[in-house]
Amino acid sequence: MSFALNLPQQFFLAVAFVEGKSVEVHYVQGAFQTKPDFAVTSWNLEIKDLLKKTVQIGN
């Protein structure tokens, strides 16, 4: 996690929407702004906010 915060241009969060055999993948850069506390076991994120940060990868 620390690397993703320090080098956000090198790390992506993949968000995949799956319906049947159809898959739509979005790549989010800079998804995390702060490091979680040691005892954190889950982290809820707003999909609509993540999708505002999507970037194209590859082609």
Image: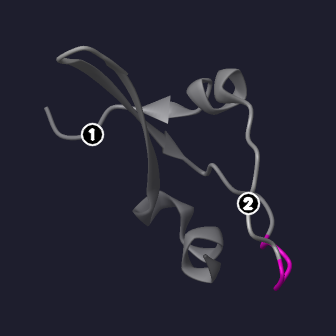
User: In the rendered view, does 17 fall on the left or right side of 3?
Assistant: left
Give the magenta-colored segment's residue range. 35-39
- Could you say which quadrant of the image residue 18 lies in? top left
Q: Residue furthest front?
A: 20
Q: Residue furthest bottom?
A: 38
Which residue in the protein does label 1 denote? 57
Local crowd at mark 1 within 10 Å, few (<14), some, or many (≥20)? few
Where 10 sits versus 38, above or below? above
Which quadrant of the rendered structure holds the C terminus? top left
Residue at 55% x, 62% y is: 8
Residue at 57% x, 25% y is: 51
Where 3 sits versus 9, above or below? below
> Which of the two discs, 1 and 2, labels the residue nearer the N terminus?
2
Which residue in the protein does label 2 denote? 42
- Could you say which quadrant of the image residue 11 lies in? bottom left
Where 45 sits versus 2, above or below? above
Q: Percent x, y for residue 35? A: 78, 73
